[in-house]
Image (spheres, grey):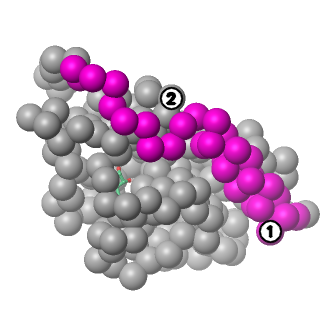
Amino acid sequence: MATPLRHAPLQMQPPVLIDRDAIARRVAELGAEIDRDYAGQSVLLAGVLKGAAIFLSDLARAITIECTFDFVAVSSYGKGTRSSGAVKMLKDLDHPIEDRNIILVEDILDTGLTLSFLKRTLMQHHPRSLRVAALLDKPERRMASVKAEYVGFTIPNHFVIGYGMDYAERFRNLPDICVFPPEAAD
Ligand code: IMP
């Protein structure tokens, strides 16, 4: 069992970058787009834990075609705001994906290292199709050539928290997407 994280609360309300209403409107649009693209078929939403959990649960409810979901977990940033660059699978999907339409659901496409690793790994299991839905895209920091077919918002290079996204496991429960104040980093 990991040691509980104890931190002082933020001294200020972090600046809101994208508010909950804008998120809800955009997620509804993405759901409608997925409905159109896969009309008459089914999709498996494969969420990347833990950051994509809230996005996936809203996106799934914006989709009306037959849809199931599953989750993978990969190593992430740990406590800080910078990527270590190395990606490792911590939890694989529970069910086979051969001949299924897979949509990998990710919170942020940043350097692209996570998604290029996951796409390569999942392709080895011969899905019928494999696409990516990323709530946020930070193209400035891209290191691996990977694109998301469904993007919620393209944002500048801020470290963001809320709507599932964390700093050291905190702030995932903020309903809006906020900019993490750099002075609060420890
Ligand atoms: P990538 O491999 O660099 O594309 O990183 C993807 C993962 O890094 C995301 O799924 C997030 O978990 C994490 N990440 C990247 N940028 C941020 C951020 O601004 N806030 C919180 N997590 C982030």
Give the quadrant of residue 126.
Answer: bottom right
Looking at the image, is 125 positioned above or below residue 178?
Answer: below
Q: Which residue is mark 1?
A: 37
Return the x and y of residue 83 as percentages of the image width and height: 21, 58
| Residue 178 falls left or right of residue 46 | left
In the orientation shown, which residue stands out farthest toward the left?
A: 186
* Circle 2 residues within 10 Å: few <14, some 14–19, many ≥20: some
- Identity of the amino acid at label 2? Pro
Q: Is residue 112 magenta?
A: no
Of residues 113 and 119, the one drawn nearer to the viewer in this rendering: 113
Residue in view at x 18 percent, y 55 percent: 82
**Foreground of the two, 51 or 28:** 28
Q: Which residues are magenta?
A: 10-39
Quadrant housing residue 20: top right
Residue type at numbered disc 1: Asp
Left or right: residue 123 compared with residue 99:
left
**Which quarter of the frame holds ligand 1?**
bottom left
Residue 175 image label: 2
Considering the image in quadrants, where does the C terminus appear? top left
Is 120 placed left or right of 66 in the picture?
left
**Residue closest to the eye, 61 or 71:** 61
- The tag earlier along the polypeptide, 2 or 1, is 1
**Can residue 90 be seen in this snapshot?**
no
Residue under the point 63% across and 53% down: 45
Quadrant in the picture for the N terminus: top left
Q: Which mark is residue 134?
A: none
